[in-house]
Amino acid sequence: MAPEVREAMLPWLTEKFGNPSAITRPGEDAKDAVAKSRRQTAALIGAEPEEIYFTSGGTESDNWALTAVFDRMCRKGRHIITTAIEHPAILRTCEYLAQTRGAKITVLPVDKYGYVRPEDVEAAITDQTILISVMTANNEIGTIEPVREIGKIAHSHGILMHTDAVQAFGQIPVSVKELNVDLLSASGHKLNGPQGTGILYIRKGLKLGALIHGGAQERNRRAGTENVPGIVGLGAAAERAARRLPEKIRKETERRDYLIRRIREEISHVHLNGPDPCRDDDFSGKEKSDPEENKAAQEELTREDRDLLTFTREEREYFHFPEENGAQPEEEDFAEEFRDDFFSKKAPEASDDDFRKSCRESFRQEQKDVPSWEKHFLSGVNKKEEKTAAAGVSRAESYTRAMWGLDDGSGPDRSDAGNHMTEWRSGAAGKAEDTRTGAGGWTGGTAEPRKNGAVTDGNPAGRQPQETESAQPQQAAEKNQPPRLPNNVNFSFEFTEGESLVIMLDMKGIAASSGSACSSGSLSPSHVLKAVGLSDDLAQGAVRFTLSEDTTEEELDRTVDVLKTSVERLRGISTNFDAYLQGIRPSETGS
């Protein structure tokens, strides 16, 4: 937990122990503390305080959202749409509803980056669909999903929209209004708050049943004496996250890309799982194949260049940052003032290219105290400070609106931000049989849009056909990728086992994961990595690193050093790696 979160909780763990339902002075103090935390948490996601319900975490919130909607809407229909990469809290709940209450579940496939197409979601809708649940960002591979577009589709069909935002909560801008969601789940421990705390956002006016029956707590929807210390800690963590979000994103993204580049340059036979933010500096969509050449090119970049390269083109578009190519208005003004001095005094024989390069470097040097993306972002916030304050909009919400480019009505319309991504999946990855399930059960999706909700037999893992390179042109796939969470890195290390790597890292004081933390110790490959098309061997060799704004470059250097030694040791005892070095194919070894 963050120090300020711990300090906020301490009084409620020691001398303050009132029951918020009591009419005594200590009870009133506790009630006020819970109300304050509700306001703090609501502000982080742009909700109203009365739309926030405190829970024990994201799993409880997911269960509540899905079961309550089904119980409320099952007379209208029994069809729920979700994706193959959802957290087990969603997939297992859907499985429970299918097995015990006759729900019909469609599990949609994703592409090799873990991205679900809005078109596929719309094609899966039937007249029985009552709920769509798509996570905001994936916990294993960091893919940020097009929830805003999917939410618009859901509402256009009169369908409720839920998102599991546990991994995005306090990590990237999240606004329930801009995402077009009716329900949102989140956990406190993902933003430096206490474990065992969470929220469920329920849109005002949406009448859902109680999760726990008994007293009148949480407005008669979740009975039981409130966890006041945990709720206070969650509120403090939410307020802290809102205040630090821009700098947090910058730091984590920089460290993320540093770790990705070091692993790629220094360890052979590795595969980055999820969107690739570390492409060549010309943004051509193709990374340099020679690690030494790539490293040398990076060393030539100025610090300001690297700040720009912290974000991919798609991530800048998602966060509404300025483009890296083409001069911005302030740069054009600077160029006019710089031109005469440059050609007359500094370099009279210089070319236009020399001038542009020198001008940009000088401009960046002048702006070095504030990275260009942050300057652009904060200017959007500051310009609206008076207006948002007068309207009663929190600073957290103004942050969110600025990052989405929605400070006022003048910004570009982001409603079709995901449309350019449709070309990733040109060609069919496989066709589904046009069959129906029985009264209840799982249905798999197809790679192509379907008419009238045609479905196939499936399971919680999706059992989707693997996509092939021929089905996805390599150039389009590399250039058009969804944004990735700033703090997520997931690599598969060939000829190793992820669990063994995690144990070896842990012995050196480095905590990592071989999949979802909730599935640690499982012998089965990650359902997320299988859904994006990885083989069992690659999926079993995956390790996930989650960074924070406090992660240092020195810590990452040590992590890579330990990782290199560990990978080398595991490959040294691998018969498959030995066979590979001898040029023997797996089929010849019987493995």
Image (spheres, helix red, strand yellow):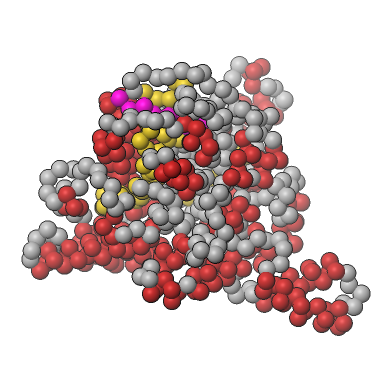
Q: Is residue 320 left or right of residue 471?
A: left
Q: Please provide the residue range marked out in magenta.
A: 102-109
**Residue 571, percent from left and from top:** 60, 34
Compared to residue 134, the image places residue 253 above or below, namely: below
Q: Is residue 544 magenta?
A: no
**Residue 157, percent from left and from top:** 42, 39
Whether residue 365 is visible to the viewer of this picture, yes or no, is: no
The N terminus: image quadrant: bottom left
- The residue drawn where x is 35% and y is 47% is 182
- The residue drawn where x is 13% and y is 51% is 216
- The residue drawn where x is 27% and y is 50% is 205
**Residue 306, percent from left and from top:** 66, 62
The C terminus: image quadrant: top right
Count up the numbered dots.
0
Q: Is residue 106 magenta?
A: yes
The residue closer to the viewer here, 514 or 405, is 405
Q: Examine the residues drawn in magenta and state their main secondary structure.
A: strand
Q: Is residue 406 left or right of residue 241?
A: right
Write down the quadrant of residue 533 in the picture: top right
The residue closer to the viewer here, 391 or 540, is 391
